[in-house]
Image (tube, rainbow, N blue to C red):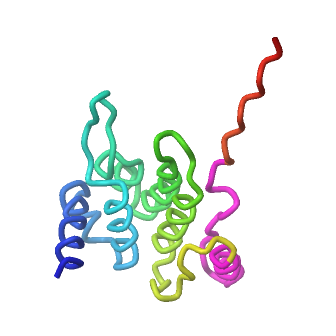
Amino acid sequence: QLFVKDLTEHAEPLIEHLKPEVLNSLNRNQLTALASLAFNIGPGGIDKKGRKLGFKYSPVVTALNGPGTLPERIDKASDGFARHIFSKGKRLQGLVSRRLGERTLFVRPDAKPADLPGYDRPKLKAYIDALNQSEGQPDVRYADMWPPAPRKAKAKKR
């Protein structure tokens, strides 16, 4: 019951923030990936510093509701998952893996959630590489989608 309640509450941002024609055009895997993202980053709001946060203001939602054909918007939205890999300004490997799993599900309408090897990065990379080698499938662009880890500034000599 708790799971169903949680799922219902976190599916609401999809209904509230996606245009109806977009929402009705997405398949089950895309909706699952978006619900996972909304659950993890929150529905959306403005913090004390006036920053827009959460699903409502995500580049994923902006792209899906934006101009262009639906396939173009889905492709652009898939790149937006990579924007949600930071917590308190720090890049977290766990979020990188989570977003990669969500994005893989989002761009692979033929993928089944049970087929994904969880968020184990080496297994997920091997899975994506195998998908990329199959004929007629769009490239997942594993290596290109995630920004490199931020470099630490060198200490200045005094």
Tell me: 46 left or right of 156: left
- Relative image position of residue 51 (x, y in whole percent): 33, 33
Is 145 situated left or right of 154 in this image? left
Residue sitting at 55 percent across and 61 percent down?
94
Q: Which residues are magenta?
A: 123-147
Classify the position of the N terminus by image quarter: bottom left
Residue 136 lies within the magenta run = yes
Q: Is residue 67 above or below residue 5?
A: above
Q: Position of residue 84 (x, y in %)?
A: 47, 51
State the residue in front, 118 or 109.
Answer: 118
Q: Is residue 11 magenta?
A: no
Residue 2, position as x, y percentages in the image: 19, 77
User: Residue 108: image x %, image y %?
Assistant: 51, 76
- To which quarter of the image does residue 141 belong? bottom right
Answer with left or right where residue 157 lies relative to residue 148: right
- In this rendered view, identify the residue nearer to me: 83 or 132: 83
Q: Residue at x 67, y 84 (%)?
A: 134
Q: Which residue is nearer to you in this view: 13 or 156?
A: 156
Q: Nearer the viewer, residue 52 or 120?
A: 120
> What type of secondary structure mainly makes up the magenta span?
helix
